[in-house]
Every structure is written in structure tokens, then in C-alpha cells.
Amino acid sequence: MIKRPLALKFIFGYLLCMVPLLLFSFTFGTSLIHKYVSNEMKAKLYIYAQFIEDNYFTKIYDSASSYMNTAIAEEIQQYDSVLQTHVWITNQTGTLLADSKNINLQGSNYVITNYDKDFFSQYYYENKTLSPLLQEPMFTIILPVTVNYSIRGYIIVYQPMDIFLQSISHYEYILFYILLGIGIILAVFLIYCWFITAHPSKKVVQAISAYVSGDYQYPLSLHGKDEYEKMSTELNFLAEQLQELDDYQKNFIANVSHDFRSPLTSIKGYAEAMQDGTIPPEMYNKYLDIISFETERLTKLTNNLLSLNSFERGMANLDITSFDINHIIKRTASSFEGTCVKKHVKLNLTFSEKETFVNADESKIQQVLYNLIDNAIKFSHNDSQIRITTIEKKEKVIVSIKDSGIGIPKNSLKKIWDRFYKTDLSRGKDRKGTGLGLSITKEVINAHNENINVTSTEGVGTEFTFTLPLTNPNEI
């Protein structure tokens, strides 16, 4: 649907160039050729007439002998045979003194003004006839011979119009071949332009159509060091991003459906059982607790999704203040006292300074610490230890949470930041997590323009470290 209109545009462009050129050539061009050939022939014939004047006019004019004039006419005739011309020599009244074509056609019986009284009023004629002296059309020039500012006679040189027209045709052929060459060169150029524009454009359109239909694996390869190569690179990158986004959306929908279905099924099942009397009234409190727990899971999952969405859309406003990170770590760690006692896990807090003030959003950093400590406890063995440290280095504080738990498989390290991602080990260890904690953690740290990293060895343990900017002492 695109190739044909674009081809028509190239054809229209070709015609837009060639039609005015042809019109100009066949109007002004032919006119210029006619003028050029005419001037060229006039100049050549005038030179010849001047030669006749210099060498023969006086002899003919002063001679009273017709025999003498005939001899001179015969001599001039030899030049005519080479130049394809004819020469008349007349006196001031127009009486023919010599004719190089008919050497016997001369004398008082042949007075040119008798045939055309205005003949000598012009010095140049095209397509001139003078019956019976000139039967065929001639290209004619007239050279007046003057002596002491008075006309003594005329030299008339004429040449058949066929020679003039042949010269014009010669130049018109040259013009034609030039136009033909220009037309061919322009056509080749436009075909080349079409090939380097329409051909890759067609590939781009096909690729975009494939991407629109969901075929993100469609190969697009445009060679050359120009905008099309850059377009090819960008479109391939876009296809990769769309593929990742499509995979992400599918996984997202699958994970959300799975994580919402489980608690909703429990809530619906227990509510219906209580409603139809399957669960006796004395057991209501037990199952209401389960319903409340599952409701909290749904609320937490929803809030986490909203938090992630606000970060990704750039709508999460940070409330930056200066606070003691060590104090926040202590307060967050204390909230896990019951869980730690139950699993016999010890939290070991080590700070390089008694107080370490940072510039950050206190509530969101507390959420990061909560998620990382919660993960560390969740995947730690019973009777183990978790080390939480802060170290000041230049203008940063490095916060570390290190456990000696089950660790993360090497092939999962880059995926732990993805939404809903859970390793097989984590799924077996705890099925209650939403799989969003680490995603939120990374988004919070990135929003602070800081870095978070993880190192882990399966069966040995995992360490998360992130940085925050230290507060300038003058700002406290």
C-alpha cells in the first residue's frame, strides 16, 4: 500500500523535472539554436563577401569586357563549389555584373530591382526566392560596396536553405541527445533514490506491522552508515523492549492472578462455609482470624503494587530529611524481636559511629530496612546470626544486611529485583511473600540516586548493601 504511492511520487517528481526542461528546450532552446546558426552562417558568408570585394569587385566593376567578367565568375565558381554558395556582383543600380552560378547571366537585361525593388533595403534574408533568378529558397546576405561614403555596388552571397536547416538539425540532434542523457541520468538517480529510501522503508513498515501483531522476533536488518541503520538499531531495541514488556505483562497478570486468587479463595470459602452453617458458630473466631490474615495479605499486595507504580511513573515524592540511620536500624530491628525469638535468630548490629546522619526519606528507608531484614530472617537457618552494619566512607554511608542462610542461586541473582520473582528455594521456604519487596527496595534506593547490590553464595548466605548520602555537619 505504500510502495505504489511512493513510486508515483518519484514518477511525478521525474515528470516535474523533465517536462519543464523539455518545454524550455523545444521553445527557447530551438530559438537559440536558430539564432546561433543564423549568426554563424551570416558571419561566414560576410567574410566570404568581403573576400570577393577585396579581390574581384574592382576588376569586375572597372572592366568593360564581358569576357573578363565571365573569367572572374568562373574563378569565383571554384570557391563556391567548396563553400556551397553562389555569388552575384551588381552595380549601384542592381544591374548584374557577374553570377558565379550562371556565368553567362549578366548585363543590363538582368537588373535585380526589376524583380524586387526593395531587395537592397535589407542586408540579410532567410528563405528568400527571386524568380526567375532564384527559384529555390536561399539564405542570403547582401554586402554594400562603398567608396567615399557612397554605394558603388553590391556583393550578394546566397546559400541553399537546406544547408541552413541541416545545421539547425545537427544542433537539435545534439540537444536531443543531451536531453536524453539528462533524462536517463535523472531516471537512474531517482531509481537509486527510490531504492535507498522506499526499499528500506518497506522493510521498516513490515517490521512495524510484525511488532504490532506481536511478532517481536521479526528480523530487521538495514545496512549502511545512515539514518536507516540507526532506525534499524532503534527499532530492534524497541522490539526487545516490547518483548520484555509483553513477557513482563504476561508474568505480571499470571502472578497477580495467582497471588490474589489464593487469599480470595480462602476468604470466599470460609465465608460461605460460615454462611451455610458448615462451620459452627463456636469456630467463627478461628476462621475470622484466617479471613482477616488473608485480607491483610491482599491489602499489602495492593499497597505494594501502588507503591511500585508510583515509583515507575515518577509520582513518588520523597520527603528528604536528615535523620540518624543507626537509630532507624535499631527501631526496625526491634520490630522483629518476636520472629527472631521464635526462630532463634540473633540480629548483630555494628555501627562505625555512634550516630550517622543521612539525607533521605525516613519512612521509605525504614521500609527498605524492613524488607531486607524480613528477607534475611525468612531465609536464615534456625540458631543463626544476621549482621547489620553501617560504615561511613567519604560522603556516603554503606548499610549492609548479611545473613548465613540458604543463599540465592547464581542464575537468579539478576532476577530478584523483578516483580513477583521468587526462586524455587524461596517458594519452598515461604509461600506467603508477595514477591514485591525487593522490587520496592530497589525503586526506593534508585529514587534517592543511590545504589543497592547483592552478593550471595548458595548454601552460605546473602549480603545486601546500599548507600545513602551523609548529612553535612553544618546542616544539622
Image (tube, rainbow, N blue to C red):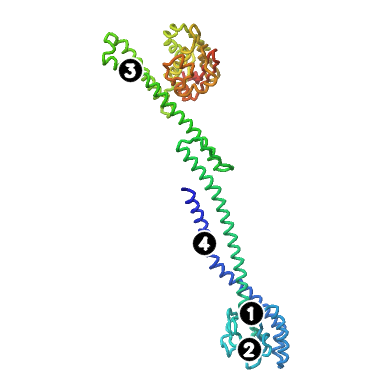
Residue 171, image x, y percentages: 61, 68
Instruction: Measure the C-alpha gap from mark 2 to mark 4.
Output: 53 Å
Labels 3 and 1 touching (C-beta < 8 A): no
Amino acid of disc 1:
Gln
Q: Which residue is mark 2?
A: 92
Label 3 CA crowd tier, 10 Å (few <14, some 14–19, many 20+): many
Labels 3 and 2 touching (C-beta < 8 A): no
Residue 443, image x, y percentages: 46, 24
**Lower position in the chain sequence, tag 3 or tag 1:** 1
Instruction: Measure the C-alpha gap from mark 2 to mark 1.
Output: 22 Å
Instruction: Measure the C-alpha gap from mark 3 to mark 1.
Output: 117 Å
**Quarter location, residue 275:** top left
Amino acid of disc 2:
Gln
Q: Is residue 387 above or below residue 3?
A: above
- Left or right: where 146 falls relative to 453: right
Instruction: Measure the C-alpha gap from mark 3 to mark 4.
Output: 81 Å
Residue 201, image x, y percentages: 51, 45
Q: Which residue is mark 4?
A: 19
**Quarter location, residue 50:** bottom right
Labels 2 and 4 touching (C-beta < 8 A): no
Q: Which residue is mark 3?
A: 267
Q: Is residue 286 above or below residue 315?
A: above
Front residue of 353 and 269: 269
Labels 4 and 1 touching (C-beta < 8 A): no
In this rendering, the label closer to the viewer, 3 or 1: 3
- Left or right: where 411 falls relative to 340: right
Label 1 CA crowd tier, 10 Å (few <14, some 14–19, many 20+): many
